[in-house]
Amino acid sequence: MSKRDLLLEIGLEEMPARFVAQAAAQLQEKVEKWLAAERLPYEQIVAYETPRRFAVLINGLAEKQPDRNEEAKGPAKKIAVDEAGNWSKAAQGFARSNGVEVDQLYFKEVNGVEYVHARKSEAGKETTALLPQLGDVIAGMNFPKNMRWGAYDLKYVRPIRWLVALYGNDLVDLDITGVKSGRVTRGHRFLGTEVELSHPGEYVSKLAEQYVMVNPQERRAAIIEQIRRMEQEKGWTIPMDEGLLDEVVHLVEYPTALYGTFEPEFLSIPREVLVTSMREHQRYFPVENAEGELLNHFVTVRNGDSRALDNVAKGNEKVLRARLSDARFFYEEDQKLSIDSCLKRLETIVFHEELGTIGDKVRRVRKAAAQIAAMLNVSAAQTEQADRIAEIAKFDLVTNMVGEFPELQGIMGADYAKKAKESDVVAQGVFEHYLPRFAGDQLPASVPGAIVSLADKLDTIAGTFSIGIVPTGSADPYGLRRMAAGIVTILNERGWALPLDRLWDAALQAYAEQGVAKRPVDEVKQDLVDFFALRLKNLLQENSIRYDVIDAVLSADAMVVPAVLAKAKALMAAVADEEFKLVVEQFNRVHNLAQKAEADHVDEALFAEAVERELYKAYLAVQQETANLADEDKRLTVLATLRGPIRTFFDQVMVMAEDTSVRNNRLGLLLRLSRLIFGYADFSKLVFA
């Protein structure tokens, strides 16, 4: 079958860097789906992108669809023909839907039953006749933010300025918002020119001649190589922030790294302020010496070649100097503020219109933190430290620096708290109460900091759930999933056996006292159970726990996070043992019959057989031994000792006895056993080969 390459490029005004990669990926995905739907074979598809374009190059695209010869199965013979032996309406409809005449239908036996069949043949269409449909594929793309231009109805990430659509040497006819496809693409906005392509294979090389690197991985590699070379030449260390690197890759079409200098006196500003100012405002990389100390240099990446780099560096230095001057001014002005004056201003800042001010939140968090400290039975000193952290944790929200750089919240609070003579634990706790901020982030190192981190996150989650704001699908504007994951991680890493429902109660109680909750507490708690179950599931998956074991432990008592993981690990080890399968069989027999019990009342006087008494004694012994047993592996081992008494019981006793009182007594015993055993995990969820 003959093949040709296909190039599809959409040229636009510059896109925001955060949209570039996903635009190219989306185009590739949509084109792949279209090719599959149209049954067009190809060898490979590669996506390219720069801030001004996204494109796909499809190698070895067949020149026509393969012919299709298929056998379609229709209704059974008794439905396909009537009593007179004529084709029924069902058979006639089947023939029409498959494009054949009724006299072309035939019968074929399937599993002992005759069904009517039709053989349909369809010649493959020429690819050139199908390619104009790609215009709809392009127009059907969606983006996080869209715009309209001119009088056109199309909403797109940015106005389309040119289209290239080539199939081999042939032009594919497309027209979107008045822009007709051609074979002319555009080089670098300042360094390049328009270039005409004779076939798709020239795309990458001809644009490279016009100072455009369409492969983002090549741009990334070029930036890294240039920066590493600069490190070697200057003896510097240039930390590579992956997020910043990604952004820079998608800001330029032809990267050239350069460095600049700023006045040493700016180094008196806290490192985080300098780095944030360079990264967020200017997209600069900081420079360090061998000891990791910040130097008065920066590295940036120009969208262009190496000509006149000195002038470019001077321009960047001038802009950064102004930024750092502002940062220094904000920092110095913030030193004039007292913590108390900042706390008073929190009373005027709205946390949420239905949940009160930041001041209200501070009071709620202090109450929750006090309850958590009491649950943990920490020292009086740590309780006092946690209370002070909760009291001042948000004070830096009203500072100039955090107003300019919101991502510095907590960081500046810790710095200003130290300068205000707060203790090291309290100052550090102001920063720690935001941790973890994202997956894989550091956790609070101090006990007081961890307590307030839990209280703060619980307060936000409980409050939003109380007024009906529950994350659905991908929508989570308040970052509640991240906060819940942080709670789970802190509890697990510290091994704190704090039941989640007690933590929710602590947070919900504060809202009840404030009188702002809109939903019944029981309804909110059920939503919280479901919400945290997903976070626990993620934790278990991260620890390579099998899906059936996850279902088993989450179907039982899953309120104590460290215990949930410990149970899952114990079960993972147990299910690998063939003997454990026999244990689970007995557990499930107990559970299945226990469903028929009306109550868990047990009267020893009604035991008719010795094995009933033996099973009851075994139950009481295991119940007592596991009551306060924290070792979940040992707890499972103790539960497994019930296998023998249970098996003997079932071998020698008819549970469903004719005597109603004896029968109910036996079912009550099984119900008690079931609650004890299945309080550990739902063993019926386990899957054995």
Image (cartoon, helix red, strand yellow):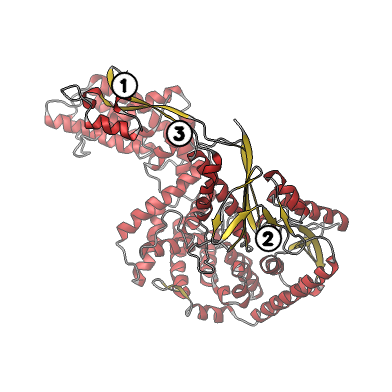
Q: Does the CB distance between marks 3 and 2 fall below 8 Å? A: no
Q: Disc 3 to disc 2, how far (Cα)?
A: 50 Å
Which SS class for mark 2?
A: loop
Where residue 83 sits, quadrant-wise, is top left
Residue 251: assigned label: 2
Q: Does the CB distance between marks 3 and 1 fall below 8 Å? A: no
Query: Which quadrant is the C terminus positioned in?
Result: top left
Callout 2 environment at 10 Å: few (<14), some (14 to 19), or many (20+)?
Answer: many
Q: Disc 1 to disc 2, how far (Cα)?
A: 63 Å
In the rendered structure, which amino acid carries the disc numbered 3? Leu
Where residue 307 sits, quadrant-wise, is bottom right
Residue 59 appearing in the image: no
**Image coordinates for residue 143, horizontal then vertical, percent:** 52, 58
Q: Nearer the viewer, residue 256 or 638?
A: 256
Residue 150 appearing in the image: yes
Residue pointed to by mark 3: 571
Residue pointed to by mark 1: 106
Which SS class for mark 1?
A: strand
Where residue 58 sits, quadrant-wise, is top right
